[in-house]
Amino acid sequence: MRFLRSIYHYLLAWLGNKIYRKPSEKLFVIGVTGTKGKSTVMELINAILEAAGRKTAIISSVRFKNDLLSVGNLTGMTMPGRFFIQRFLSEAANNGCHYAIIEVTSQGVLQHRHRFIEFDAAILTNLEPEHIEAHGSYENYRDSKIKFFRDVADYSGKDKINFFLNADARDKDYFIKAVAGRGKLILYQKEDVRKFKIKTKLLGEFNLENISAAIAFARSQSIDWETIRSAVENFAGVPGRLEFVQKIPFSVIIDYAHTPGSLEKVYQTLRKLVVRNKQQKLICVLGSAGGGRDVWKRPVMGGIAAKYCDQIILTNEDPFDENPEEILNQMESGIAEKKSIQKIIDRKAAIKKAIQSAKKGDVVIITGKGSEPYLRVAGGKRIPWNEREIALKILNNERIEI
């Protein structure tokens, strides 16, 4: 059955390419993969290309962009199938776009959604355990990312292909081996940003890695250094990625972090904003991996919260058909030490409690949803959701339904 499904998806990819007359041949196509940072890298690259006068198209978990037209991704899929990508590339080419930037997911690779796209460049941001239950193991998950690199090397018809690898990425040697001798390999690292003394509005060491990836790509396109510097320094960030809703008198931040690694990096970054000897607190509203997937994360993320947060509010995220209370109990099981812990199923009520608890100098960080437009609950139901708007209403003392 699995083999038949694979053939089915492969044929759909082939047919879409035929129907839309091989649109990727008319574009410079960039595929960005990795566990975290993909959307930020894509938007940084887009900002630099636009500053250099290039017309761009984007398919990401955040939005679909075709030159000046941009709409939020409301599909619930980072890498849509059923001819979507080929049709999108065709429209981008017809609209005179020079570059198309595609977010490539591990599950998209399993369903061959990257096939029959002539990629010019592939970028790996980083790698950590994710989608373990969907893939069966971390190794299988990693191999799907490697397969993307290998397939670009083996099947892309473009004359010159560049592979960009984070020099600090876990298991990067597997990727190097996969493309050895079949394209130009470019290693980048966060020290590049420090070396060139670039000022950035983005917080966190992890964003230095994202910036260095974008710089490495831009330099491969012979974009002048001043254009790169100006674009990076003016880049304000991606919605839902360490996005400040408020900074004074206390900070309220939303972030998409939904893996242990990304959650810890966010907490490490924000911990530096809190001065404990002034009685300031890091107040954390934490959901976990959605229902039916990556159950292993839940106690791990609870333990990370215990390490960094002064006040923890465990809440709902995307339970699907699981019992939300059980998900919260599993997160709580990873919190060994005594902490100020509350469990509030209703996510709006949890956010309200966190904000009402905050005092001058505190930092409230709400993780798990970022800019996602829906909460996914039992029976396949999707509840419209806007985390930033909810936080703003609470801050402005507006009424919200709980």
Image: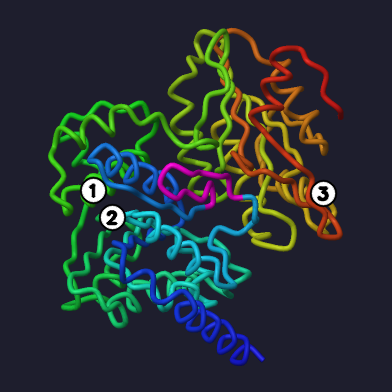
* Residue 366 x/y as whole percent: 63, 32
Residues 194 and 151: in front is 151
Under tag 1, what secondary structure?
Answer: loop
Q: Which dot marks residue 166?
A: 2
User: Any magenta on residue 287?
Assistant: no
Q: Kindly identify the amino acid type of the residue bearing the numbered disc 2.
A: Asn
- Mark 2 and mark 3: Cα distance apart in space: 37 Å
Q: Kindly identify the amino acid type of the residue bearing the numbered disc 3.
A: Pro
Q: Which residues are magenta?
A: 61-73
Mark sitting earlier along the chain (3/1): 1
Question: In the figure, 89 relative to 376: above or below?
Answer: below
**Quadrant location, the C terminus:** top right
Mark sitting earlier along the chain (2/1): 2
Residue 356 falls in which quadrant of the image? top right
Residues 247 and 20: in front is 20
Q: Is residue 31 left or right of residue 2?
A: left
Asked if the residue at tag 1 contacts the one at tag 2, i.e. Cβ–Cβ closer than 8 Å, the answer is: yes
Label 3 neighbour load within 10 Å: few <14, some 14-19, many 20+ = many
Task: Report the residue at 67% width, 91% height from top.
Answer: 1
Mark sitting earlier along the chain (2/3): 2
Task: Report the residue at 30% width, 70% height from top.
Answer: 175
Q: In the rendered image, which residue does mark 1 sit on?
A: 189
Q: Which dot marks residue 215?
A: none
Q: In the rendered image, which residue does mark 3 sit on?
A: 324
